[in-house]
Amino acid sequence: MDKDIAKRLTAWKNDPIAFFVEALGIPKAYVWGKMKEMCETVALSRKIAIKAGHGVSKSFSVARLCLWYLYTHYPATIFTTAPSHNQVENILWREIRDALNKAAFQLGGKITTTKLELEDKWFAIGFATKPDQGQENATKIQGLHNEHVMIIFDEAAGIIKPIWEAKEGLMTNEKAKFIAIGNPTQATGEFVDCFNDPTYEKITISVFDSPNYKAGTEIIPGLSGKEFVESIRHKYGEDSNQWKSRVLGEIPDANADGLLTKQWIREAEEAKYKESDQDEDKRFVVWDVADGGEDAHVIKSYVNMNEVESIEVLGRKIEEVEPKVWRALRKIRGNCIVVDADGIGRVATEFLEGSADINTEIIPFEGSSKDVDDEDMFRNKRDQGHWKMRDAFVERKIKIIPNQNARNEYQTLRLMDNPRGLIQMEPKKDIKKRISRSPGHSDCTMMMCSEYEDIPVSETPEDNDPYGYRSRDSYVFKNHAMAV
């Protein structure tokens, strides 16, 4: 490195923006207010927490701050981490590699996918912090001592607790800097705690801060703007946690990837019996079929969108459970059964169809089916069904029976990011792994909401029919759940 560049590196030591523009070749027009605030805060502070909406140049800026610190502080060790290998290698470190490739001049060093080395003890490295590698990664962090240290937690809401604890050992170095940055997807946790800690400098970046939003057109390539804001408003609504997290960059009331909030679930449990706005009721049963093992069959009876009975059947074969489904249907004088028809559910569907009379309709629900109302919004019927269930909770159309297992299932349902921008639910196998059972209660409610429009109305019962539920006074299953 020639003397002139070395002299400029000394000048850039306290001026990240100058390094961005003069060394990395970023156009001055691309340096906007919140980027400048972020850089100035990092230059002057030791501990910085940054919560931000979607597409506001988080990774772009942090990648270049990483290079600024590495090249202007000697000797320096930087480690970056994120919850997954993809987030490390293909997001933050892709930006680091891209910044070096586009630099105004050769800065030097040897770079791989997740390491940039200038000398033996002068380098930056990135790795994922997966839960099953928690202790291994914590040991890596604790071993990265140097005169200058920078620690970057990207998508910090997803970083596991042992890694947060391990970085404290490095912060005893007075020259160490720590940056926690990310979309605030969680309502609680170590990242959220940073914003209640007076030792942190705190920054919030909203999509409304973006020059692209303010101008109503693309001023800076890649930044979110009005189109993104309108898509989140249309998809989730301004009262949603997705809006808070992805647009405002604010900490949500509940996890932003959660399908339902605790408040919606509680209101559905406490709701009074909801009268039909039609002359006749829909009375039907939904059966979520167990795959075997320790999974339970779940059978729920409904009058309109009021859940009136819930039964769990453990350790029984399909042919042993089918009579219980028919008994539940007769009990409410229903005329329709919605049944899970994926996998082993196909056998249950065949049993029901073979036993049904001409007055009973069997509706098979195939969650894997791509027969959806809007292909630009949903991948399959399972994703669409969960979204219809969310709408039913949001619009206070639904009444559910209070049940701890069911409550846990509703609260654990998560949305996933989809590269096409579609609504996508977390796979069922991942839910089962997290809660140690199949989500039969929430699946029943989801199937009910999915197929509700196609469920036929029933004949009006006689006045003395105890299961007609024409008024809440005759609603005999209040707060009742039965395990068989």
Image: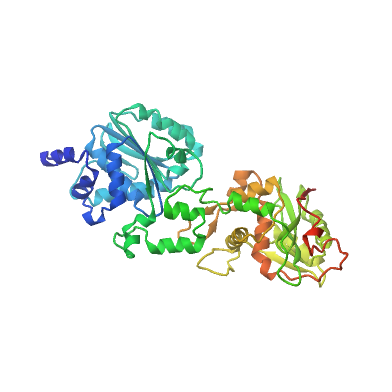
As displayed, is residue 371 above or below residue 4? below
Residue situated in front as seen by the camera: 466 or 451: 466
How far from the left and from the top, in percent, is residue 133? 48, 36
- The image quadrant that residue 142 belongs to is top left
Above or below, comparing residue 336 to residue 316 in the picture: below
Q: Residue at x 69, y 52 (%)?
A: 270
Asked whether, in this view, residue 123 is left or right of residue 132, the answer is left
Residue 326, given in percent of the width and then of the height, sits at 82, 60
Residue 343 appears in the picture as rendered: no
Left or right? Give the position of 480 relative to 59. right
- Counting from the top left corner in percent of width and height, residue 325 is at 79, 58
The answer to whether residue 456 is left or right of residue 139 is: right
Residue 360 as seen in the image, left or right of residue 382: right
Q: Residue at x 30, y 41 (%)?
A: 41
Q: Quadrant of residue 88?
A: top left
In the picture as drawn, the residue positioned furthest to the left comes out as: 3
The x, y position of residue 183, in whole percent, is: 43, 48
Task: Depth check: give the residue in front, 163 or 290.
Answer: 163
Is any part of residue 59 visible from this angle?
Answer: yes
Q: Quadrant of the N terminus?
A: top left
Q: Residue at x 43, y 55 (%)?
A: 247
Which residue is at the front of the view, 395 or 105? 395
